[in-house]
């Protein structure tokens, strides 16, 4: 029986975790982040989120050493919970990864239209008041087809691309931070908060799970590790991705707020590029930001595409979805049907256009936190060591608080009716596609 290729090493795993996390949000949605928290509120929100998620990352590091299964959370929860719990847990995590794919495809069209305004022509229809233009639609479709082909050709090609993209994004980002530090002014960051300090931090913290989802993608490709890869390195890759990713967002917010007055950026598309243009009067720097945004977009799309296809493959292998999803190409050693399935779903999602962008962050955040909570509580129940159980308990508490922030009506920024509807539709699709009952494990 053909098996998945075993090619991945430490930098590949870090690049996947980081690449699944860092996309174009820091360029396209910076105005939303600053509007939520202001400079300091947003920075504290992302910093707190990154630090609070470390115990969860540790739990994943322990799980993947013991159970290197592409099913991830579904496999972990299957050790202690009924089959329907493990199925729905994995299904929620599939949503967290998959939903990013059409998001990034739509974002590419939005980014391309900023560079080439002619793409904002030939309106086809509107969703939630947002127009969908044919040229932008074709750009997103083209990207999806290209990345699907890269992944079809093999994990090595996908990993090599992720390595190159991650290195490029980090190098350019360091340059932008240095430019901001040299040319900015402290007066630009005032006022420090957009609301009361605590509210500002909480409003930002609510979306952190969506933007740092990715560190737990490492276990989804654990079965593809190089034969000599030490199991303890999985947590190393997870911690690296989580800390570098959270730090990236904190410095991005700080750099944008320092280079230009942040209140002038709220409500504007591509606030990051606008800030550096205002602060440096350099068009080449703006072009560099847009260029590296494209690279970041490709890397996060590719990372989430990989994680989604592996989860779908694992479900097919377990027989809870159609077994065809477990089919592996004899030469490329890739899950071809799962790749085609995620690509097809992405193409359908692209049809929603810009209306998909901001609401998706809310739904994806809840889906991620739900998966984290399930992984932590499962580890707490199977682990005997007191210290590790304490870490799992902290992870449970953190992820539960993140869930409650989206569900409790009294908390600012809680789920709206549209977001409940989207979540309900996804769960309904999962129940319809579930092939047969039975324990997953």
Image (cartoon, rainbow, N blue to C red):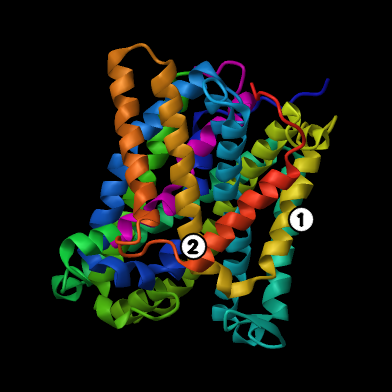
Estimate the x, y position of residue 144 in percent, counting from the top left.
71, 58
Vertical position of residue 137 compared to residue 429: above or below = below
Horizontally, residue 111 falls left or right of residue 274, namely right
Q: Is residue 98 magenta?
A: no
SS of the residue under disc 1? helix
Which residue in the structure is indicated by mark 1?
344
Residue shown at 53% from the left, 27% from the top:
77
Q: Residues within 10 Å of mark 2 (few under 14, many from 20)?
A: many
Q: Image quarter for residue 240?
A: top left
Residue 178 visible in the snapshot: no
Could you say which disc has been placed on residue 151 in the image? none
- Which residue is most to the top? 384
Residue shown at 55% from the left, 52% from the top:
300
Horizontally, residue 215 falls left or right of residue 432, namely left
Q: Nearer the viewer, residue 222 or 284?
A: 222
Q: Are marks 1 and 2 in contact (CB under 8 Å)?
A: no
Disc 1 versus disc 2: nearer the observer: 1
Estimate the x, y position of residue 244 in percent, counting from the top left.
36, 44
Q: Is residue 209 magenta?
A: yes
Estimate the x, y position of residue 399 in percent, counting from the top left.
37, 41
Magenta stretch bounds: 203-230
Which residue in the structure is indicated by mark 2?
24
Q: Nearer the viewer, residue 384 or 212?
A: 384
Q: Image quarter for residue 173?
A: bottom left
Q: Give the overall secondary structure of the magenta segment.
A: helix
SS of the residue under disc 2? loop
Residue shown at 69% from the left, 58% from the top:
346
Q: Nearer the viewer, residue 185 or 4?
A: 4
Vertical position of residue 366 compared to residue 436: above or below = below
Residue 408 visible in the snapshot: yes
Q: Quarter holding the N terminus? A: top right
Estimate the x, y position of residue 402 in percent, counting from the top left.
35, 48
């Amino acid at each position: 029986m053909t098996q998945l290729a075993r090619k991945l090493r430490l930098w590949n795993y870090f690049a996947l975790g980081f690449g699944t996390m860092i996309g174009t949000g820091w360029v396209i949605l910076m105005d939303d982040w600053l509007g939520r928290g202001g400079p300091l509120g947003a920075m504290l929100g992302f910093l707190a989120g990154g630090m609070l998620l470390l115990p969860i990352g540790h739990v994943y590091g322990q799980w993947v050493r013991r159970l290197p299964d592409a099913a991830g959370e579904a496999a972990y929860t299957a050790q202690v919970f009924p089959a329907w719990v493990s199925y729905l847990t994995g299904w929620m995590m599939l949503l967290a990864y998959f939903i990013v794919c059409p998001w990034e495809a739509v974002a590419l069209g939005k980014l391309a239209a900023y560079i080439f305004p002619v793409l904002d022509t030939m309106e086809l229809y509107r969703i939630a008041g947002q127009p969908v233009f044919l040229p932008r639609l074709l750009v997103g479709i083209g990207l999806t087809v290209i990345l699907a082909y890269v992944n079809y050709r093999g994990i090595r090609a996908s990993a090599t691309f992720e390595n190159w993209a991650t290195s490029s994004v980090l190098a350019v980002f360091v340059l932008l931070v240095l430019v901001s530090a040299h040319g900015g002014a402290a007066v630009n960051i005032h006022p420090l908060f957009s609301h009361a300090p605590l509210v500002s931090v909480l409003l930002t913290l609510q979306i952190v799970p969506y933007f740092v989802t990715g560190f737990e993608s490492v276990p989804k490709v654990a079965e593809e590790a190089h034969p000599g890869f030490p199991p303890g390195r999985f947590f190393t890759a997870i911690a690296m991705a989580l800390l570098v990713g959270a730090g990236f967002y904190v410095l991005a917010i700080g750099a944008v707020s320092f280079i230009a007055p942040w209140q002038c950026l709220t409500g504007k598309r591509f606030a990051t590029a606008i800030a550096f243009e205002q602060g440096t009067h350099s068009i080449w720097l703006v072009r560099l930001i847009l260029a590296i945004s494209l690279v970041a977009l490709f890397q996060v799309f590719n990372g989430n595409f990989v994680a989604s296809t592996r989860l779908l493959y694992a479900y097919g292998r377990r027989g809870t979805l159609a077994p065809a999803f477990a089919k592996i190409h004899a030469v490329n050693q890739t899950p071809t049907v799962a790749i085609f399935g995620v690509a097809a779903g992405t193409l359908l999602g692209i049809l929603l256009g810009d209306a998909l962008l901001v609401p998706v962050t809310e739904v994806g955040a809840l889906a991620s936190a739900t998966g984290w909570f399930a992984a932590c509580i499962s580890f707490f129940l199977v682990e005997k060591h007191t210290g590790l159980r304490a870490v799992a308990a902290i992870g449970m508490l953190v992820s539960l608080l993140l869930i409650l922030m989206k569900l409790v009506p009294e908390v600012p920024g809680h789920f709206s009716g549209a977001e409940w509807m989207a979540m309900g539709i996804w769960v309904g699709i999962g129940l319809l596609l579930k092939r047969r009952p039975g324990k997953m494990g």
